[in-house]
Image (spheres, coloured by chain):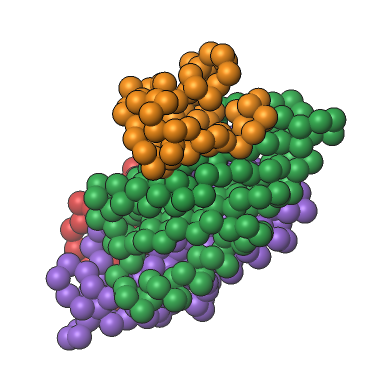
Chain colours: A red, B orange, C purple, D green
Amino acid sequence: MIQVRFFASLREEMGREGAELEAVEASTIGEVWEKVAAGKERPANLLMAKNMDYSGPDTPVCDGDEVAFFPPVTGG
Amino acid sequence: MIQVRFFASLREEMGREGAELEAVEASTIGEVWEKVAAGKERPANLLMAKNMDYSGPDTPVCDGDEVAFFPPVTGG
Amino acid sequence: MKIKIMESPFNPWDEMQRYEKEVLDPLYAGQYGAATVFSGTMRDFNEGDGVTGMLLEHYPGMTDQYLGKISQEAAEQWDLLDTLIVHRVGLMMPNDPIVLVAAWSAHRGVAFEAARYLIEELKSRAPFWKKEQLLEGERWVANNTPA
Amino acid sequence: MKIKIMESPFNPWDEMQRYEKEVLDPLYAGQYGAATVFSGTMRDFNEGDGVTGMLLEHYPGMTDQYLGKISQEAAEQWDLLDTLIVHRVGLMMPNDPIVLVAAWSAHRGVAFEAARYLIEELKSRAPFWKKEQLLEGERWVANNTPA
């Protein structure tokens, strides 16, 4: 399984905190987005993380990974 | 009268905290130094203040002024 | 090198005092000539609107990891004795402290540069998000302002 | 804008807490998004020698005047809400706080630049002098180190 998480405004737009995918359904982070986004285009400023490290859409994913999508960070 | 003050290492070298001059004895800070320094050459890095404002050797002095001589500052 | 994520209000100066007493002094008393600290506080006004409250969301785990990374990067770039980062999460009120970063060193130039690095990197990389509560409605803060 | 010359030990974080509570909060609660603080502490080692104590001499009157000037210059150069400078004088021990400078602003860049200005100008212009007590004898510090 791949655990997918959404944060902040993206979580609200998606209407859910995350999703689960079978590992065979996606081989990159970009493909994970396509599976879970229900047709929503990937925002230009969307940030992506694999296992809590910033990553890009071409980063490969495999069984057991946690993939997160979120808007620009605004802490501090 | 002109009040003269020495601080820090200069005070120790001079062996006193200051001096008093009659206003007629000196018309600039440089001349004040010559009167009170007992022949000691003015150190290149000596700092001078008139009435608690940094000044130079050519600054005029008059009756009632306070003139101070001191080494480079080392606070903070 | 310490990272603290706080779910309730904190006072930055209490944090500094406690950290120096409990961590710095036993290890480095007489060695840390310089500490530079940045404290960020919630304002009641942003982009022309009054702000009555703020929800600070984060990505638990990734937050700690990135604050640790940033602290580690600072320790590699500068000759530091220690660093401290404290960040609030959850619901907060105007004038509540949001963030504290501190860098201790033997010399002041290094302490200033490292503290500045910590706050700039935190703001651009650590996964926190602010949602402002306005007099009418609420909104997500879209972007951090440049320094 | 406050200047304090302290003849006995002070704790920089107590000073910050008290000043924010008594001065900043009544005037500016919710407005000061950013505070940058520099705290300088006496080290027990300098130029290769152990230092067991230090006498901090100053020029009373001129000290206050120059710390006031420097604070005023910072207020004219940057958009600040307030500044605080605290400086110890007299006989002190290793690990005693020597100096605190703080700048409050709505924005962090300004707070960092102003705090840096305060400490650099203080070190180059305020009439303080340090005499170190060594294991054997004592010596005047000749020059402040560049930042």
**As rendered, which of C55 and A25 lies closer to the eye?**
C55
Residue at coordinates 58% horizontally, 18% vertically from top-left? B38
x%, y% of residue D53?
A: 75, 43
Residue C127, quarter of picture: bottom left
With B48 as the anchor, is B13 left or right in this view? right
Question: Which residue is situated farthest in the bottom direction here?
Answer: C136
Residue C14, quarter of picture: bottom right
Count of numbered tags: 0
Residue D138 showing in the rendered view: yes
Q: Please, is residue D25 above or below residue B27 in the view?
A: below
x%, y% of residue D82?
A: 34, 62
x%, y% of residue D121?
A: 41, 39
Residue at coordinates 39% horizontally, 68% vertically from top-left? C41
Residue A68 showing in the rendered view: no
Question: Which residue is situated farthest in the right direction here?
Answer: D136
Residue at coordinates 70% horizontally, 49% vertically from top-left? D91
Q: Please, is residue B30 above or below residue C131 in the view?
A: above
Residue D108, quarter of picture: bottom left
With D13 as the anchor, is D73 left or right in this view? left
Residue at coordinates 66% horizontally, 59% vertically from top-left? D9
Q: Please, is residue C111 above or below residue C17 in the view?
A: above
x%, y% of residue A35?
A: 30, 61
**As rendered, which of C20 and B65 lies closer to the eye?**
B65
